[in-house]
Image (tube, rainbow, N blue to C red):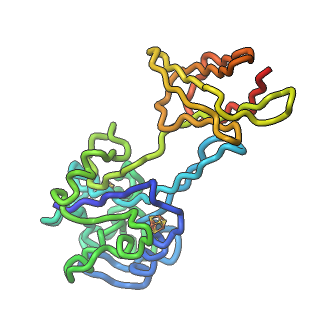
Amino acid sequence: MKVFVVDVARCNGCYNCQIACKDEHVDNDWAPYAKPQPDIGHFWLGIKETEHGQIPKVKIEYKPILCMHCAEAPCLKAANDNAVYRREDGLVLIDPVKAVGQKQLVEACPYGKIYWNEELQLPQKCTGCAHLLDQGLQPRCVEVCPTNVLRFGEEEEFKDLISQAEVLNPELGLNPRVYYLNLPKLFIGGEVYDSVADECLQGVTVTLTDAAGKTLTTQTDHFGDFWFRRLEPGVYSLKIEMDGCKPYELNSINLDKSLNVGAIALR
Ligand code: SF4
Ligand code: SF4
């Protein structure tokens, strides 16, 4: 069975994959796998940009999102006349002849990855570039990615990566066949300065404690900055200490999105 593995940490948001998907499918008829994609409105593979944090501590996350080729695919169940089917390699495909008029398929995908082609009255989505796979080639998005974010191959070949990966919306229970590495978590960042000298402070100890009492400790860098990354949502407290200074404490931080606690003065 084939899978996609997507390493989000390597994605620079160049959009090559999104553009290549359009180049491959707009105006090109790849029947029996797909009819041409319209010029606008469809993102069979689309980059989702998410901004985390607040100025000046901001990180942008780019996440390629495509049909998840779910093992438990609700689109398959919602289709009449077997208009959605699974190939032997695991790819879920929409039959562009049988699916004409089956607009219910658009709503059937909880990932929002089935698009309606008004002109052809057809639901459409990523085919995994099945027409290229049949020629021993890779999907176009995989081929064009300059930083090797997107990989496609046998599940067995990627089993080590899959063991470290996550899927999107696991709560849906659809067993997606697109695996993500390094999905960003939340962060808490800030900076510490000496309010008398008006200088940033390097080497200050910063301790973060979660609701269960587990602590993480770091030190400010030469800009006075500190970061705690890959945090889960929850309640935290922050303590900032340096010899000769009054400690600073920030309690009951309810972390549901990444947070810049700002510039903190030590006296
Ligand atoms: S992501 Fe949507 S379109 Fe793709 S297999 Fe799953 S339910 Fe079907
Ligand atoms: S081509 Fe690769 S690096 Fe560029 S946006 Fe797509 S996944 Fe990210």
Quarter of the image with the C terminus in it: top right
Where residue 246 sits, quadrant-wise, is: top right
Q: Above or below — where is 15 with respect to 232?
A: below
Viewer-closest of 4 and 146: 146
Q: Is residue 130 visible?
A: yes
Q: Residue 180's x, y, as percent?
A: 36, 51
Number of disc labels? 0
Q: Is residue 101 above or below residue 69?
A: below
The x and y percentages for residue 59 are 60, 48
Rendered view: 116 above or below 72: below
Q: Could you tell me which quadrant the N terminus lies in?
A: bottom left
Position of 50 compared to 135: left or right? right
Residue located at (68% from left, 31% from top): 261
Residue 84 in the image, given as x and y percentages of width and height: 23, 62
Which quadrant of the view contains residue 146?
Answer: bottom left
Residue 218 placement (x, y as % from top left): 55, 30
Of 46 and 259, the residue lying toward us: 259
Residue at 61% of width from left, 21% of height from top? 238
Residue at screen point 34% across, 59% down: 67
Left or right for 265, reference 177: right
Give the left or right position of residue 138, taking residue 41 as reference: left
- Residue at image position (55%, 36%) is 187
Q: Is residue 78 visible?
A: no
Query: Can you tell which quarter of the image residue 121 is in?
Result: bottom left
- Furthest-left residue in this view: 88
